[in-house]
Amino acid sequence: MIEYDLHNCITYRDEQYYYIFNPYTIGSIRIPNVGSVTESIKNFGVPTLYENGILIDGNLNGNSIAKFLLNKAKYDKKRLYLTDAITYKCNLNCVYCMQQNTFKGINRITPVEKVAIWERLFKMSNCELLNVCLFGGEPFYDYNYLFTLLNQAKSKNLNIQYSAVTNGTLINDDTISLINNYSINHIQITIDGPAYVHDKRRIGNKAKNTFEQIINNILKLLENTECEIVLNTVLDRNNKDTYIELVKFLNSKFSKFCFSSQARIIFNLGMECHPYNKSDYTNESIIKDLIEYHKIYLKYLQELLSLGNTIRFVMPNGLCIAKHRYEYLIAPDGCIYKCITGLGLKEFRLGYLNDIYKDALPLLLKESQFIEKEYAQCNNCKYQALCNGGCYYSAFINQASIDCRKQLFDAVLEEYVKLSCSVVKTKNGYYKGV
């Protein structure tokens, strides 16, 4: 019989349950509290806990397991993920825009050249499927360019699944047709609060009442396409207290799309980041204390679930574009980047347009510096699988050597674990309350 050792696990308890979390496998479970944790485990069934990666052989090294599972995920070759910034242009002037200080005086390449990059990266990767996220700026800003781009990709018979991140203001009959004809099945739209909050943050260059525009366009998408819609909100000090007011409005407006067994509206919360060189707005509004932010974030995830909504994420993920082998960001000029928030910054650039047509090794060697970056203080850290060295962009923008999140997880992990034990995963990979 394999002997288990709970030193590999973190346990919490209340009057009804024990919450057991393995930080190396990210496995979590809630079991009835019938006395001590050992008695409760035996009562629940030891084999079940092994099968779910909660308990592991006490002779195994937890950090080796964490590294192995991280590597398994980051070198998974099933899909190549490309986030393509179609243009830097946008019809909104958002107060916290990540690209407000980024140099944009570049020459945009043609759709034919852009698809050639997709094709080259796809062939280099040997992946089975290509996922392309249409990004910007605003991806629907230049309809003719986007139409030509997608048509060119279709002519290459690439195995592509599309998604888009849009501000939601440019949805019209032509856009709807494009979404349906090219099976753009996942769209993210940001709404930052009720109209009186949102319209002060996400400001149209022409139309001022973008909230009403977006709500009407969401309805168009729901009624005329099959795509799922992620409604994202960027939280900061200026809108955090109005979030549930927004959610209740959206639940009322789109109830049949929020609460069905396969909901087409999914909620997501995002953290506001500083643009390059920061800005007056973000300096004043960002929730600088990560612990404070995550407590607010967790509170709202719990409220979303209690209202019956579907959420996009629960536990923090140690992988991002920078740390995933088969994931890239392509700029309008064809440059390749390894961080979505570092778009346009040389510190996150892997190479220029022509570099991917040369020997691939120099580009891959540069990429290794992101994927396999190591920090001495991460060695033997029990949060390695959750944090994985933290956010490279956050360390860069704050002029720090590392974005260490040990103090954060010391403070909020219990709430994350309890939340993860109160949800079920949907067929589409999202989460609903038990």
Image (cartoon, rainbow, N blue to C red):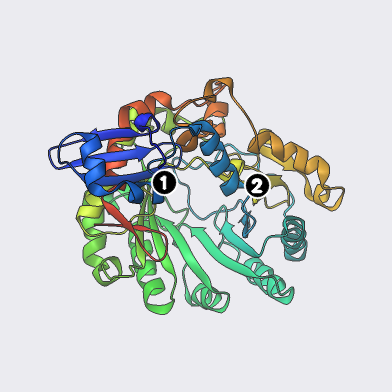
> Cα distance, mark 2 to mark 1?
25 Å
Residue 9 in picture, x, y percent from top left: 36, 34
The answer to whether residue 410 is above or below residue 153 is above
- The 10 Å Cα crowd at callout 2, few under 14, some 14 to 19, many 20 or more, is many
In the visual, does 396 lie left or right of 35? right
As helix, strand or loop, the secondary structure at mark 1 comes to loop
Please state which of residues 139 and 82 is positioned toward the viewer in this rendering.
82
As drawn, which residue projects farthest toward the left? Answer: 15
Question: On the rendered structure, is 425 left or right of 174?
Answer: left
At 44% from the left edge and 76% from the top edge, which residue is drawn?
225
Q: Is residue 74 left or right of residue 292?
A: right
List the single residue furthest toward the right. 358
Closer to us: 55 or 328: 55
- Tag 2 residue: 325
Q: Amino acid at mark 2?
A: Arg
Vertical placement of residue 109 versus 324, above or below: below
Question: In this figure, which residue is indicated by the disc labeled 1?
Answer: 53
Give x and y (percent) for residue 280. Answer: 45, 29
Residue 357 location in percent, x, y?
84, 53
Whole-percent x, y for residue 158 in the image: 69, 70
Q: How many marks?
A: 2
Which circle, 2 or 1, is nearer the viewer? 1
| Label number found at residue 327 | none
